[in-house]
Amino acid sequence: MPDITIYTDGAAQGNPGRGGYGVVLLSGPHRKELAAGFRLTTNNRMELMAVCVALEALKFDGSNVTIYSDSKYVVEAVNQRWVFGWERKGFSGKKNPDLWMRFLRVYRRHNVRFVWVKGHASTVENNRCDELAVAAANSATLNEDTGYTAD
């Protein structure tokens, strides 16, 4: 099974506001792009949702995955292992528990490594994800982010 490289990004116009995510999945000669827009959400929700959707799109459990994201919110929560402490405490007082639980379910099915990249810089695929996320947020057809709650 070839290694899988994933780039993700989220965007929000207003925070909260219209939002979207963009994903680029790369594996050997294969490339897949995913995106969706939402009527009312936040930037952090879109960053995390992009990672969830990307991992859920993988066909085989046990894949070796490297995720490149410009979201310190997501990357540091995993790399610093904070999310596992939040989980032990039932995500008490944490935002986006629905997405963090969704993330952990799919994260545990694979061997995942996170790499933070600077946003709006020279990382071609991260820039592509940004384009996808912004276009999704601006699309005429927007989904409802059913897990969003104004805190």
Image (cartoon, rainbow, N blue to C red):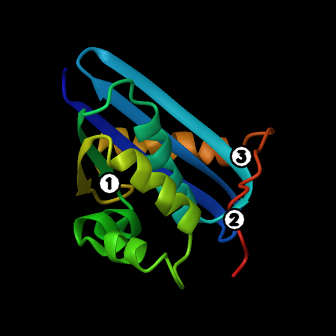
Identify the mark nearer the N-term, 1 or 3: 1
* Relative to 24, 144 lies left or right: right
User: Label 2, on which residue?
Assistant: 148
Examine the rendered structure and indicate whether residue 94 appears above or below residue 11.
below
Name of the residue lying farthest toward the bottom:
93
Badge 1 amino acid: Ala
Quadrant housing the C terminus: bottom right
Residues at marks 3 and 2 touching, judged by CB atoms closer than 8 Å: no
Q: Residue furthest right?
A: 140
Q: Quadrant of residue 75?
A: bottom left
- Amino acid type at circle 2 is Tyr
- Provide residue 141's location: percent of width, then percent of height: 79, 38
Residue position marked by numbered label 3 in the rendering: 138
Residue at the image point whose x is 73% and y is 76% from the top = 150
Foreground pick, 117 / 106:
106
SS type, badge 3:
loop
Looking at the rendered structure, the kind of residue marked 3 is Asn
